[in-house]
């Protein structure tokens, strides 16, 4: 389980930042060093998430949005429902397990030689596999990567159903 920074309280965040749940943007409440009240705050990191610097710490904006909206830090992972990591509108965020958050992966990992999610190359065949409920499942060996990926997508639609 990842450990997230929870070093500040909701009240401390509210004293310094405004959050607009309809746009997902954060603005400064008060003037400070190199900032003016009302200015939008946050920077995009290399993975496309918005990060906000606050009281000497850096926080992912989606976790701050959750804190300000619901009054508590998220219990697990914050999932961006539409898959866009910079879209911090509250309707696009949900507190889910690591497994459920992983289900939203749209593309293969960088080290995946097939370039397709759920597909690996073994010899001259393309294997499809998926993990659901902690169980790895082999879906078959296929002649083309597209066929293996189609098998993966079918299984994903059946198995990866979140509440």
Image: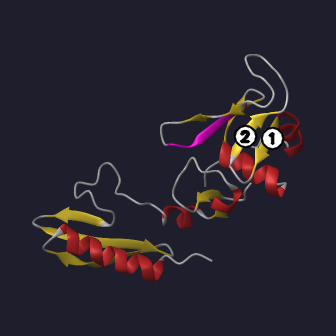
- Chief SS of the magenta region: strand
The numbered mark at residue 155 is none
Q: Residues within 10 Å of mark 2 (few under 14, many from 20)?
A: many
Q: Residue 75: x, y in percent?
A: 72, 59
Residue on which the image places disc 1: 18
Q: How many marks?
A: 2
- Dividing the picture into quadrants, the one containing residue 37 is top right
50 part of magenta stretch? yes
Q: Residues within 10 Å of mark 1 (few under 14, many from 20)?
A: many
Mark positioned earlier in the residue sequence (2 or 1):
1
Distance of label 2 from label 1 (alpha carbons): 6 Å
- Dividing the picture into quadrants, the one containing residue 139 is bottom left
Identity of the residue drawn at 33% across and 63% down? 117
Identity of the residue drawn at 90% across and 42% down? 11
Q: Is residue 66 left or right of residue 1?
A: right
Please provide the residue range marked out in magenta: 48-53
Q: Residue 100: x, y in percent?
A: 55, 67
Q: CB of mark 2 within 8 Å of CB of mark 1? A: yes
* Mark 2 secondary-structure assignment: strand
Q: Residue 146: x, y in percent?
A: 21, 70
- In the image as oriented, which residue stretches furthest toward the left? 124
Residue 93 visible in the current orientation: no
Q: Residue 104: x, y in percent?
A: 49, 63
Which is nearer the eye, 47 or 8?
47
- In the image as oriented, which residue stretches furthest toward the top? 33
The numbered mark at residue 26 is 2
Which is nearer the eye, 128 or 135?
128
Q: Quadrant of the C terminus?
A: bottom right
Residue 34 visible in the current orientation: yes
Q: Is residue 51 left or right of residue 124?
A: right
Which is nearer the eye, 21 or 4?
21
Residue 127 vs 25, above or below: the answer is below
């Amino acid at each position: 389980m990842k450990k997230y920074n929870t070093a500040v309280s909701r009240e401390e965040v509210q004293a310094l930042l405004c959050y607009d749940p309809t746009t997902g943007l954060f603005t400064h409440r008060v003037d400070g060093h190199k900032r003016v009240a009302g200015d939008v705050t946050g920077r995009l990191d290399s993975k496309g998430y918005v990060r906000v610097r606050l009281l000497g710490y850096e926080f992912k904006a989606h976790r701050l949005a959750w804190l300000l909206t619901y009054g508590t830090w998220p219990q697990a992972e914050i999932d961006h429902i539409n898959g866009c990591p910079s879209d911090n509108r509250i309707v696009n965020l949900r507190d889910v397990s690591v497994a459920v958050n992983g289900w939203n992966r749209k593309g293969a990992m960088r080290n995946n030689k097939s370039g397709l999610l759920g597909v690996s190359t073994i010899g001259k065949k393309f294997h499809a596999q998926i993990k659901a409920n902690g169980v790895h499942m082999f879906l078959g060996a296929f002649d083309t990567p597209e066929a293996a990926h189609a098998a993966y997508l079918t299984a994903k639609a059946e198995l990866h159903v979140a509440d």
